Amino acid sequence: MQSPVFNNGAKDNLSFFEKLERKLLHLFKLTNEPVVKVYHGYGNTSKMIVFGHVFSLSPLPRKKYRKNFWTNTFALLRSFMVKRVADANVRLMWGETVCETKTAKDGFFRFEWDTPSELPPAIYKVQVQYYTHEKGQVEVLAAGVGSVIIPFTNQYAFLSDIDDTFLISHSSNLRRRLYVLLTKNAHSRKPFEGVVTHYRLLANAKTTSTNPNPFFYVSSSEWNLYDFIKEFTRKNELPDGVYLLSQIKRLSEVWKTGATKHSTKFMRIARILEAYPTQKFVLLGDDSQQDPTIYAGIVSHFPGRIVSVYLRHVYEKNISNVRELIKKIEDAGVCVCHFEHSKDAIEHSYKIGLIERSEAMKVIEVKV
């Protein structure tokens, strides 16, 4: 393979106006330099999957979190100020493995490859390069590093929604959802009371803290909010995991946030179960949107794979439909916990044997 040339001198070749534009963008915490954004991927002992985006305009990473209304509003809007690079040449480099593809219309790329040998559970680093190939010369315009997680094969794995499952989001009310998105940040947004304790107990269910159960976070929220969600989970000490979000949106579509077609969410969940064919899963969601419908479909399509379904009750209007779907899931032999308070979910997890009595009783007795 021909050695690539990294475009390190691009800044020196800029005109006066291009340099001025770049400085002005930096004042607004934006960059028009090419960026390869690589998200957490996942894999098993023989196959690995990773995905990301290529941007020609994107927000710079946020470093400070203030409670100022305008600061938070502009930070949220910045996450939608992106220009996606379509049909870009990208290649993945991992050890001796090299995979090549082109980005889709929205700048998205996905790599899936077989490993040369069976891999132990660990976090593996990969590099993705965005490059051009002209006159026999390969020029790397940008590169990004990501992680592929091969989880421990434990008794359970957990697949969780995000909005209104552990993050208070008001998904069923567009005006309230936009208000909290625009006025709060990853440090000032709040999880539901007791949910962090529940998730941390589940992460160690039937295992140890050194070999935690894998968590997959699948949401209808857009990839624009990836950094926000990751920082929120870190700040609140939720289990880290793999995040699978929805198609990225432009600034003009910010008011449609969270309104992605939910059929794609079913497909993302199905791919995870297919990647771990012998693994038992627990599903966690809420009843404000389509989680009951999607989870009922997953239970039907993957018989014997789902141990339990947890649905947080946050929306009253479609309760009769939710109850019908719960009955459908239960008729398939999967227990359902439809709850308002995380204390009740923790108690249920203890009763069905997901978590130990000693840990559950500490929480239940103090009334989370």
Image (tube, grey):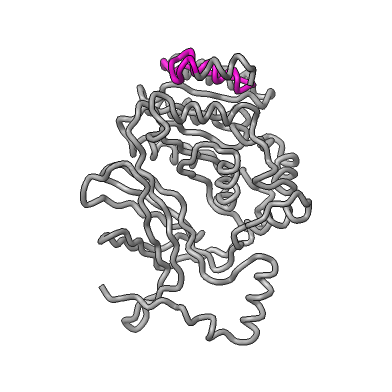
Left or right of residue 24: residue 90 = left
Residue 336 is a magenta residue: yes
Q: Position of residue 319 (x, y in %)?
A: 64, 20
Q: Quadrant of the N terminus?
A: bottom left
Q: Start and end of the magenta stretch?
A: 332-358
**Residue 336 showing in the rendered view:** no
- Residue at 54% across, 68% down: 56
Farthest right residue in view: 69
Q: Position of residue 19 (x, y in %)?
A: 62, 81
* 292 is higher (above) or lower (below) than 17: above
- Residue at 41% across, 48% down: 41
**Residue 23 showing in the rendered view:** yes
Farthest left residue in view: 117
> Between residues 37 and 196, which one lies in front from this camera angle?
196
* 146 is higher (above) or lower (below) than 272: below
Q: Quadrant of the C terminus?
A: top right
Q: Classify residue 204 by image quadrant.
A: top left
Q: Classify residue 363 by image quadrant.
A: top right
- Residue at 37% across, 78% down: 5
Q: How many marks?
A: 0
Residue 344 is a magenta residue: yes
* 202 is higher (above) or lower (below) than 349: below
> Between residues 218 and 255, which one lies in front from this camera angle?
218
Q: Position of residue 227 (x, y in %)?
A: 57, 51
- Residue at 30% across, 76% down: 3
Left or right of residue 336: residue 110 = left
Q: Position of residue 16 (x, y in %)?
A: 63, 86
